[in-house]
Image (cartoon, helix red, strand yellow):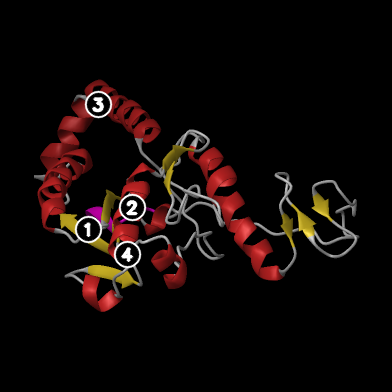
Amino acid sequence: MLERILAFSVRQRWLVLLATLAAAVGGAWSLTKLPIDAVPDVTNVQVQINAIAPALTPIEIETTRSFSRNGFAQVTAVFSDRTDIYFARQQVAERLNEAKTTLPPGVELRMGPISTGLGEVYWWAVEYTSPGEGAAVRDGAPGWQKDGSYQTPEGEPLTDEFQRTVYLRTVQDWVIRPQMRTVPGIAGADAIGGYVKQYHVQPDPARLIAYGLSFSQLVAARSQQHHAGRELHRAQRRRLRGPRQRACREGQ
């Protein structure tokens, strides 16, 4: 068999040369279309569903194949490798619409971006520049003050480390992350660490009695305000956990 192949190659040398040239051209063309990655993503086809339930513990929101924290659960739906990711997300979206009617009140469901853990390309940290190391100290202007506090561009004084940490997370969520999402090829930008600013309602029972109000009426009014407390903030929507504005001033 080998002798026949060699004899054919010698007699038909130009045909063999042409076939070799065609194979080389086809290989070069395929090389230009081949995706090359330093760290190939071998993750299976999956869709992540994030559930936010601030009032529930990890035990209460734990499900099969999930990652749970206080008020947060992440469920991963895995599909076969031949499944198109957009078809998989469409199937998950249909199931989510059906599941929303059976969930407790206040639970928010959303699908994660089309990315995996191997798709993380950049990490950054948001910090203050210390006075004397590039940050000027000017009273009345945004930045560090002579008394050691920090004044935001909105004019809010940050007098302790906790307030400054909360402000860093606010800058991360509402200034940096929206700009990072506009970068071509970026599926999402996540935030880890810091303290998210929250607003809490702490009613005074004596004042409620004085105004002739009950806790149930306060909860009902707060629930209506909660649904109305959505506002556009730099082309994004956010939901306030606390009152967006006072219904009346104290003493009135």
- Which amino acid type is marked by label 2? Ala
Residues marked 1 and 4 touching at CB (< 8 Å): no
Q: Earlier in the sequence, mark 1 or mark 3?
A: 3
- From the viewer's perspective, is the residue at label 3 or at label 4 nearer? 4
Closer to the N terminus: mark 2 or mark 1? 1
Residue 12 falls in which quadrant of the image? top left
Q: Name the residue under label 1.
A: 105
Amino acid type of disc 3? Ala
Instruction: Indicate the quadrant where residue 210 lies.
Output: bottom left
Label 1 to label 4: alpha-carbon separation? 22 Å
Q: Which mark is residue 221?
A: 2
Q: Nearer the viewer, mark 4 or mark 2?
A: 4
Q: Nearer the viewer's eye, disc 1 or disc 3?
A: 1
Is there CB contact under 8 Å for labels 1 and 3?
no
Q: Is residue 65 above or below residue 93?
A: below
Q: Do the residues labelled 3 and 2 touch (CB within 8 Å)?
A: no
Q: What element carries label 4?
A: loop
What residue did someone put label 4 on?
214
> Which residue is depicted at the point 50% across and 35% down?
182
Look at the image and tell me whether residue 43 can be seen: no
Query: Along the polypeptide, which appears first: circle 4 or circle 2?
Result: 4
Name the residue at 26% across, 21% down. 14
Which mark is nearer the camera, 2 or 1? 2
Question: Which residue corresponds to mark 3?
Answer: 19
Badge 4 crowding class, 10 Å Cα cut-off, few under 14, some 14 to 19, many 20 or more, is: few
Residue 43 on the magenta span:
yes
CA–CA distance in space, label 1 to label 3: 68 Å
Q: Which region is colored magenta? A: 40-50
